[in-house]
Image: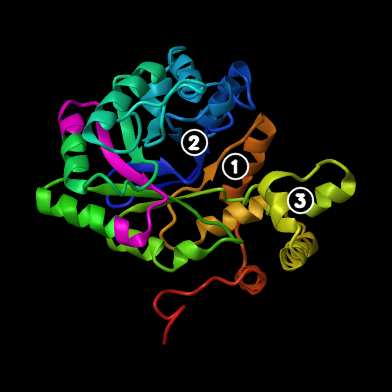
Amino acid sequence: MRYTQLGRTGLKVSRLTLGTMNFGPQTNDADSHTIMDAALGAGVNYFDTANVYGQTVGKGRTEEIIGTWFAQGGGRRDKVVLATKVYGNMTPDGEPTWPNHDRLSALNIRREVEASLRRLQTDHIDIYQFHHIDRQTPFEEIWQAIDTLVAQGKILYAGSSNFPGYKIAQANETARRLGSYGLVSEQCLYNLAVRDAEMEVIPAAQDYGVGVIPWSPLHGGLLGGVLKKEGEGSRRTGGRAAAELAKPEVRARVQAYEDLLDKHGLEPGEVALAWLLTRPGVTSPIVGPRTADQLTSALRAVELDLSQELLASLDEIFPGPGPSPESFAW
C-alpha cells in the first residue's frame, strides 16, 4: 500500500479509503469483519463511515459493526484512521421526527458525537465530517462545537462532504478568523464520468490544503465493466448505472471505454480507480466493497501505472469541464 499526507495535516493515510456503507444493509457482520481485516492486512488504514449508514436495517448499524470489530482488539483501533459523518436525521424510521436531531447545530453535533463514539466503541474519532452543508447554522457555531470536542479529545480533525467550493472557502476563512484549524478533507462525487468537481471544488480544496476524498469512483458500477457483465449474463444492471445507460450518449461512451481497456488488457473498475489516483489534489478514493473479492480488485489499482497515451484516450472519452471560470466564460 502507498500512503500520502491528508491535506495540510501531518496525518498519513492510505491511497485507498475503505468505505463501509454496505456493512449491514448488504454485507453481514462476519463478512464485514473479514473485509476490514483484509483491508487492514493490505495496509489500508483509512476507514470511512457515517452515523446514518445502515438505513435499511437501522441507522447507526454500520457504526455498530465497526465497533464490534474494534472490540476484537489486536491493535485494530490504533491502526485505523477513523472517519465518520454527522448531518442526517437519526430518528428511527417510523417514529416522529423531533427538532434538533439533524443538521449541524452545536446541540446536534454534541449529541451525535457521543452516539457515534458509543456505537464505534472508541474514545475518539479521528476525522469528524459534515455530511452536507447546513444553510441554517453559521460556521461560527459549528467551529465552536468542533473546538470544544477537539479540546475534550473526542475528535482530532474536521472534514466536509458534498461541499461546493465557496463553502469550503467560507468554512476555512471563518476558522482562520476564529483561530480554529478548519477543514482538512472534502468528500465529493468525482469519477471519470462526473468531473464537475474539477471546476471549483478541487481547486478550492488545493488552495486551502484540504485533501480530496472522491466517493462513487465507479459511478454506481457504470465504470466497472457493466456492459461486458451484462453481455455475459453475470450482472443485471440497476440503480444509477441502469438510469445512465438508458441514455444513448452515455451508453456509447461506456462502450468506448470498455473497448479501449479491453484492447489494453485492463479491468475497467481498476482503471477508474487508478485514474483518480493520477488526478491533482486527490488523496484517497473511497472503495465500498460488498465482498472480499471486490476489495482485492480495488487494491490492484494502487499499483496500476497508466500510460500518458491511455490517460489521453480516457480524456477523449470522458472530457472534463476544465477549470472555472474558463469552463463557462472567457
Residue at far top of view? 72
Residue at far right of view? 232
Q: Residues within 10 Å of mark 1 (few under 14, many from 20)?
A: many
Identify the residue under disc 3.
226
Q: Find numbered disc 1 in the image and state the secondary structure of the residue it sits on.
A: helix
Image x and y of residue 198, in percent: 46, 66
The residue positioned 19% from the left and 32% from the top of the image is 150
Q: Is residue 139 above or below residue 117?
A: below
Asked if residue 162 lies left or right of residue 38, the reply is left
Eye-nearest disc, 1 or 3? 3
Residue at far front of view? 96
The C terminus sits in image quarter? bottom left
**Mark 1 or 3 closer to N-term?**
3
Identify the residue under disc 1.
299
Per the rendered image, the range of residues in magenta is 148-167
Is 213 magenta? The answer is no
Q: CA distance from mark 1 to mark 3?
A: 19 Å
Asked if residue 265 lies left or right of residue 71, the reply is right
Type of amino acid at the residue the image marks with label 1:
Leu
Type of amino acid at the residue the image marks with label 3:
Val
Q: CA distance from mark 2 to mark 3?
A: 26 Å
Q: Is residue 329 above or below residue 43?
A: below
Q: Find numbered disc 3 in the image and state the secondary structure of the residue it sits on.
A: helix
**Mark 2 or 3 closer to N-term?**
2
The residue positioned 39% from the left and 66% from the top of the image is 200
